[in-house]
Image (tube, rainbow, N blue to C red):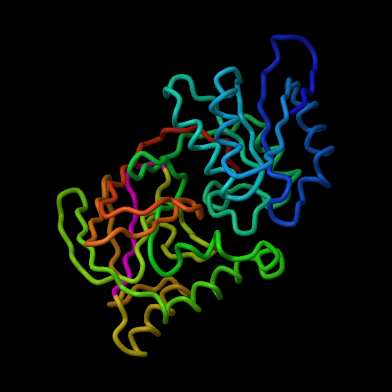
Amino acid sequence: MFNLMIGDECMEKVLFIYNPNAGKAAMKNKLSDVMEIFRRADFQVTVYPTLQARDATEIVRAEGRGYDRIICSGGDGTLHEVTHGLMEMKREERPKCGYIPTGTVNDFATGIKLPKRIVKAAEVAAGNRSHAYDIGELNGHYFTYVAAFGAFTSVAYETPQATKNLLGKQAYILEGMGKLNSIKSVRITLDVDGEIWEEDCVFGMVTNARSVGGMKLFRKKRVSLDDGYFEGVFVRNPQNPIELNLVLSFLLTGEENNQIHILRGQQITVTADEEIPYTLDGENGGQYKKAVITNHRQAITYFHGV
């Protein structure tokens, strides 16, 4: 941790948390440029590089209430940790959040139209354009944009970093497709705002993002990030090569077919006969027989692009 003290005490206090290893460690080469942007914005900045998993949550939990703005840089996992820390605060205590994406896919950044270049994204994070977006909760654990189980859920945290750096989002798609033939299905019961659905599934996802793992699974007009509703995708267990091809077709094109169950709801409960592992924003989210997934409408204000 170090402080970048600029000007008097009336200036905006900013907590900057960055993951030095995200993506290709790009922030290390751009850190001076980012600090210059903060200087021009007349920020008083405290800087923390993360050293291990869950560091960002602990930093926000311990320090966040004393700042006007929190800016984080890294992949979706870093943003996930910061978001969790913010959600542990009372709503009126939460600082606004800026995000400088440096990870492999950065789904949430795509959803709020952040620039891909670090310097441009830093300018957005230091700017004044902001909006309150929905945040999800699964059994007391918060997530920014997706909770999922099944065929693709371990891909994000099992895919080697070197592979992510080399192949980008294609790494997730290739890893996930390789798991489809070996993944076992699970019998689930869905309760979506009181409507019940039961099926054998190989994959289930609840999200408020327009793309997941870099794959655009929804038409743009169908998804809103601030309406208090989730979109859900549940993939029926394919029984033959034709049905498997339908699943792959959906993952690659986003076109719906009979193997895919699409839903929309404010609260979604997934019940299974056995504990199943979940991922939250690409991070290991624990194992549950019953997962209650709730939407917290417009819970955190993020700085966004145009």
Comparing 96 with 244, the one in front is 244
Residue 306 seen in this snapshot: no
Q: Which quarter of the image is occupied by the N terminus?
A: top right
Q: At 70% from the left edge and 56% from the top edge, which residue is drawn?
A: 23
| Residue 12 higher or lower than 262, as above or below | above
Question: Quarter of the image holding residue 222?
Answer: bottom left
Q: Is the magenta stretch mostly helix, strand or loop?
A: strand
| Residue 290 higher or lower than 238, as above or below | above
| Residue 168 higher or lower than 67, as above or below | below
- Residue 64 at x, y percent in the picture: 57, 24
- Residue 264 at x, y percent in the picture: 28, 54
Q: At 31% from the left edge and 43% from the top edge, which residue is drawn?
A: 294
- Specify the farthest residue to the front: 274
Q: Left or right: where does residue 301 sit relative to residue 272? A: right
- Specify the farthest residue to the bottom: 241
- Residue 27 at x, y percent in the picture: 76, 46
The span picked out in magenta is: 226-236
